[in-house]
Image (tube, rainbow, N blue to C red):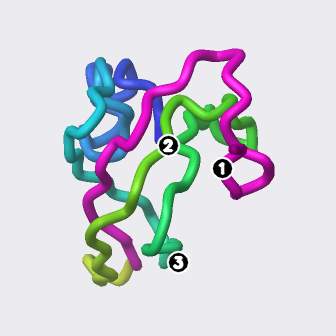
Amino acid sequence: MRDISEYRAGRRLEAECLPEQLDEGAVYAFLKSDQRLYWLFGELPLRETKGGEQLSRPKASVVITEVTHFVEDGKMFTKGKYKVAKTLAEDDDYFEGYEIKK
């Protein structure tokens, strides 16, 4: 997801960006270009991207609750919803790969 400043500058839709504040238990919409496949039976790291495969450390642990693929103007998109299971600080060591550390 992109920084919310991309939406404010008119370069991205709101659903393509991280919300200003992530709240545990809240559900947010997302939109990604292309067809994406997501794990639906557990928590995943939510990261900010600046493009060019530059990813932040996980901002939160989320569960994808809904995913839909669609075509608009000849281009593929993936949209859906995610629920924030846990917000994470920059130095939190919560995931081991995609597994949650216990």
The residue pinned by badge 1 equals: 100
Task: Out of 88 and 19, give the one closest to the viewer.
Answer: 88
User: In the rendered view of the protein, which quadrant contains the C terminus?
Assistant: top right
Q: Amino acid at mark 3?
A: Leu
Q: Closer to the N terminus: mark 3 or mark 1?
A: 3
**Secondary structure of the residue carrying numbered label 1:** strand
Q: Residue at x 55, y 54 (%)?
A: 44
- Left or right: 8 as drawn, with respect to 41: left
Q: Amino acid at mark 1?
A: Ile
Task: Out of 77 and 1, give the one closest to the viewer.
Answer: 1
- Left or right: 80 as drawn, with respect to 49: left
Q: Amino acid at mark 2?
A: Ser
Label 2 crowding class (10 Å Cα cut-off): few <14, some 14-19, many 20+?
many
State the residue lying farthest toward the right.
Answer: 96
The residue pinned by badge 3 equals: 37
Label 3 crowding class (10 Å Cα cut-off): few <14, some 14-19, many 20+?
few
The answer to whether mark 2 and mark 1 are in CB contact below 8 A is: yes
Image disc number at residue 61: 2
In the image, is residue 47 above or below residue 36? above
- Left or right: 100 as drawn, with respect to 66: right
